Amino acid sequence: MLTYNLDLEERSTWIRTTPGDFELAQPFWCTEQGDFYAHEGFFTERSEKDSYELFYTFDGRGRLEQDGRAVTLGPGMALLINCRTPQRYLTKPGAERWYHLWAHIDGPGVAAFAETLDVGALRPVTLADPIARRHFDTIATNLGKPGIMASTVVGLAVHNLLAEMVGAAQAVGESALGDEAVRRACALIESAYAEPVTLDDLAKTAQVSKSYLLKLFRQSLGTTPYDYLLRYRITRAKELLAETDYKIGQISALVGFKSESNFSYRFSQMVGQSPRAYRDSCPTPLSKR
């Protein structure tokens, strides 16, 4: 379902394109981009669209409603939403205009950033106007142009916009406490990775709840505490494989695995080759020559 009223000035722009195989194989792509000079009657109400949408307000006020939440988008505010969930956005009642830039974007990289930005919470971030405009202008200039280079430039601009938003989100109020909690949890992982570290242990050390710690890891590191622990163990195993003559079973125990078979499976899954093959591919350290 889609209802709308495009109460827009004539100078408004709207660019559409259809991604090809090359674009769809990339982590970031864009299908539509607009520069809307919207007046007080503007609104769009949609049940779903298979993409994310990024908004940036440069003048006036907008309002976005989704999942029972509502947020005002004032000048300098950027917001990413998942359009697969019903949404309504409009010029804020009482405001004369909502001048904003927008882009429909998608891809696995966008999905990862969306999780980091906790899109369901509808938390706008503040971006400097020159930064936001530069990346949106890059998208507008290259979107729809033929060729791999234009598609790559668009993807990089989308990536840069989302990275700026993550940086802005981490720079505000709550981040100091969150950063400290993540730092404490990571320090425990890095000092006790050979032991059976649990989520309870990490939350207790970080002095936050388990659910909040999971959220902080997603926002700060883009992963889970368990995945961080697993990757840390595998990295330490790489060092031991490359720099020592320890047997595979010894190494698996030293980095916290209960069985050599589980270690070999996880290592092969994450590295793309077996522990033995990895060791054979490593140069011999000077100390062992």
Image (tube, helix red, strand yellow):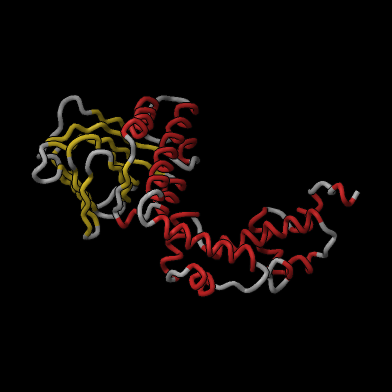
Q: How many marks?
A: 0
In the displayed structure, would residue 76 be above or below residue 262?
above
Residue 83 in sight in this render: no
Foreground pick, 18 / 102: 102
Foreground pick, 194 / 263: 194
Question: In the rendered view, does 283 fall on the left or right side of 255?
Answer: right
Question: In the rendered view, does 102 fall on the left or right side of 242?
Answer: left
Q: Residue at x 46, y 40 (%)?
A: 24
Q: Quadrant of residue 128?
A: top left
Foreground pick, 38 / 273: 38
Q: Residue at x 42, y 53 (%)?
A: 116
Question: In the rendered view, does 14 fall on the left or right side of 281?
Answer: left
Residue 270 in sight in this render: yes
Give the image location of residue 164, x and y in percent.
Answer: 41, 41
Give the image location of residue 267, x and y in percent.
Answer: 68, 60
Give the image location of residue 229, x and y in percent.
Answer: 59, 63
Give the image location of residue 215, x and y in percent.
Answer: 42, 62
Q: Residue at x 46, y 30 (%)?
A: 153
Foreground pick, 155 / 32: 155
Q: Residue at x 49, y 40 (%)?
A: 26
